[in-house]
Image (cartoon, grey):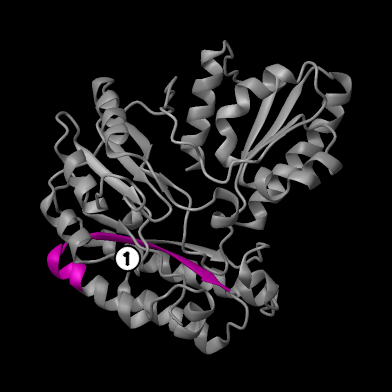
Amino acid sequence: MNNRDSELIGGMLAEKGYEIVEEEKDADVILFNTCSVRQHAEDRVTGNLRKLAARKKKDPDLRIGVLGCMAQRHQDLLLKEFPQVDIVVGPSNIYDIPDLLAKTDTTEKLLAVNNKKRPGKKIEADQRSGVFSAFVNIMYGCNNFCSYCIVPHVRGREVSRPKKNILNEIKGLVDRGFKEVTLLGQNVNSYGKGLTNKITFQELLEAVNDIEGLRRIRFTTSHPKDARKGLFRAIKELPKVCEHLHLPLQSGSDKILDLMNRKYKYEDYKEKIALLREMVPDVGLSTDIIIGFPSEKERDFEATERAMEEIAWNSAFIFKYSPRPPAVSSFLKDDVPEEVKKERNTGLLNLQKRISLAKNKTMIGSEQEVLV
């Protein structure tokens, strides 16, 4: 989602006469499009801002901006502790960036974090970083409020883009030679809620599948509580939809899942995967796992280990828990020691490597369609 936002921002600025330069030292404007999902991402931004402080003193005409989720979350801190920053812009205010940069010649500090939802504006000046595969937003925000997640607090509640706008964007991409699109939403299964013309995500997939010249369709992310047979049928029956599903489990422990406010149990998840594999035997599966969540005991971690062995995903994104205020879990005691988190994290990464290698070996001798 941040990659897509960066493309939009780059396109808007190109329309105003800006050009991307290869070297940071040659830039008149430096923008950080930020993520707040994990502390490590924020630490990288603050480290880069500190490095730029000396350059800003030598070159006061340099413009520095912090955009995205970190800007929404730490607006006051950024303006107070980083005087080198000129603009702070939340993810729902990115269309304001060209005007804000134009005003920085006369205004010292500019803040734009007022939008709770991204306006349903038509996409213009459409810049893309790739040439064959493209990201396409179908919705913004999230209504789930998982207890560890900051996304609803910084990106707002769910807003679906109209079907017509999405299809026109994809048709335009196909006309430019793109072969594959990835449909983006924090929970794509919620697509259509709130639109005047009622439509489900499965119906949107059918419409995208009908676009002439498009070869492949991917999507991310699905929430296990909402992933149902209709979605699995679309993966099975629509020829352009890739046989892959990213379905974040987060933990194999029902206790931890409950504390995470995930609204399903491990057995629910396992049954859905069994149904999907029955319908689409060669489906590729990936997931997200958080280890070291508050109160995670050894038995909870072992439940996640067992889940990895039972489900045997093709790949997994595995992260150590870090509190993200104001998400609810940040008020729980972060009581799993860092060395334990690190040990568990390394153990699961190694387990997944073994599983991935075993799965990859089963493909030796087979013939696969690839995008080069």
Q: Which residue is mark 1?
A: 226
For residue 267, say whether it is visible: yes
Residues rendered magenta in the picture = 275-291
Q: x, y percentage for residue 347?
A: 51, 73
Q: Quadrant of residue 212?
A: top left
| Frontmost residue, 1 versus 328 | 328
Q: In percent of the image, x 79 and y 45: which residue is there?
A: 76
Question: For the view shown, which residue lies furthest in the top direction?
Answer: 17
Q: Position of residue 221 (x, y in %)?
A: 38, 55
Residue nearer the viewer, 93 or 60: 93
Q: Residue at x 38, y 81 (%)?
A: 265
Badge 1 density bin: few <14, some 14–19, many ≥20, Cα 10 Å? some
Q: Is residue 154 left or right of residue 136?
A: right
- Queried whether the magenta region covers residue 297, the answer comes back as no
Identified at 28% across, 46% down, the residue is 218
Question: Which is more toward the observer, 369 or 173?
Answer: 173
Q: Is residue 254 above or below residue 199?
A: below
